[in-house]
Image: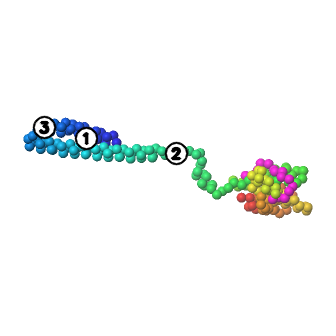
Amino acid sequence: MKYRTTAASVIAAVFLLASPLLAGSGGGTSTTEESSSNDMTYITIGLAVLVGGYLIYDAITDSGDNAHVADTGSVELIDTGVDWDHAIQNEGSSDVTVAVSVMPGPEGGQRAAQLLAAMRGMVDENVTVYDDPLDLGSGPEVQRAALAREFFGVDYLVFQVAGTDSLVRFGVASADSVLWTSTDQSGNSMLIVATELIQSGVIR
């Protein structure tokens, strides 16, 4: 742009220098002087056209350059702080939360805490085990699971199946239904109970 402007200035200067010659050539009457005057007129007109065209071209190209600079300069990168590669890689994998309901009996809270501790070492990375046993009353398992979902954001609730027999069984419920019940776990440690629960594949 700098060189085009300089060239246009030089042509304009030539045009200005030629103007006095055109003005001074009008007083003669000889054929030679008249021919020279006509030649100078044509030269001056040519220079005027050349300068005008060049200046118009220079203005148009400068306008295009400025528009291009404005377009590219308006792009600004904003750091959102999101690791999009990690987010895309994990797309489709949703985290779930599982909790254990307080079990019947005077040691029900302690037994539930033992089951929680055993489960933490076995669940997948996308499964979160709730920190403490949940005391949700003695209502139906699905109702307690719904309460756990509403108030604690729990997806699965592990509970001890209530029964009048001597069997000790455990189950997993969601807010919609009972999903799984274990075999009799009488005399088994909570580590064995947790192993059977995780191997069932119901929590995922």
The quadrant of the picture occupied by the N terminus is top left
Give the class, few, some or many, for how many residues have Cα within 10 Å of label 3's Cα (few <14, many ≥20): few
Give the class, few, some or many, for how many residues have Cα within 10 Å of label 1's Cα (few <14, many ≥20): some
Q: Which residue in the structure is indicated by mark 3?
A: 27
Q: Which residue in the structure is indicated by mark 1?
A: 11
Q: Is residue 111 above or below residue 167?
A: above
Q: How many angstroms separate mark 3 from mark 2 (CA)?
A: 70 Å
Q: How many angstroms separate mark 3 from mark 1 (CA)?
A: 27 Å
Mark 2 element type: loop
Residue 137 or 88: which is nearer the viewer?
137
Residue 9 image offset from top left, x and y in percent:
28, 39
The amino acid pointed to by label 3 is: Gly
Q: How many marks?
A: 3
Which residue is drawn at the image coordinates 11% and 38% (left, top)? 28
Write down the region rendered in magenta: 128-142
Q: Tell me, for residue 77, which label it has, or none.
A: 2
| Residue 138 part of the magenta-drawn span | yes
